[in-house]
Amino acid sequence: MTDRERADLLVALQRELLEREARLESLIEQLLDRERPPEPPARTARRTPAARPGDRIRLTEREVQILQLLVRGYTNRQIGAQLGLVPGTVRNRLGRIYGKLGVMTRTQAAVRAVELGLSRAGPAEES
């Protein structure tokens, strides 16, 4: 066997090994994909219809308290201090309130609360 024939044989063997490796990697990826739980669909913003005057909004007593303080201009930290809650809890509760009112911002929530008669507008009290 000549040096040229040996070189050609080595190139052919190397090519065959690379092709087998690629097929093996593909099979492994397919197997791993089967074992992975399906990814949940991407979250999309849910648009709930805005509450209108006359609509029955079911807010808990605590949600009403939070909403009243929001209408008066309190921050999450101030609301939390007033009601004995941490700001993260206030933020989570406000998210639920926004959903029930069909709004997406603090300002919209405050306006909707006043429109629905859930709270009277007024400035925040100085402490």
Image (cartoon, grey):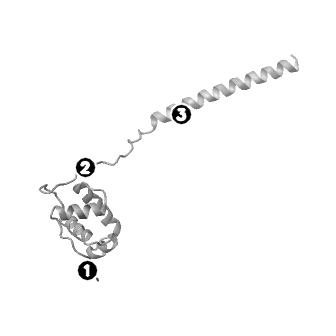
Residue at image location 62% in from the left, 29% down from the top: 22
Residue furthest to the right in view is: 2
Q: Which is nearer the N-term, disc 3 or disc 2? A: 3
In the foreground, 122 or 98: 122
- Looking at the picture, does residue 50 appear above or below residue 70? above
- Which disc, if any, is residue 125? 1
Image quadrant in which you'd find residue 41: top left
Q: Can see residue 93?
A: no
Q: Position of residue 61 (x, y in %)?
A: 18, 66
Amino acid found under the numbered disc labelled 3: Glu
Residue 4 image position (x, y, % from top left): 85, 19
**x and y, in percent, of residue 114 in the image:** 19, 65
Label 3 element class? helix
Residue 106, by quadrant, is bottom left
Give neighbour class at mark 2: few <14, some 14-19, many 20+ (Cα, 10 Å): few
Q: Nearer the viewer, mark 3 or mark 1?
A: 1
Look at mark 3 in the image and give the residue it sits on.
Answer: 29
Q: Marks 3/2: CA distance?
A: 40 Å
Residue in view at x 53 percent, y 33 percent: 29
Q: Which residue is mark 2?
A: 48
Residue occupying image coordinates x 29% and y 63%: 107
Tag 1: amino acid: Glu
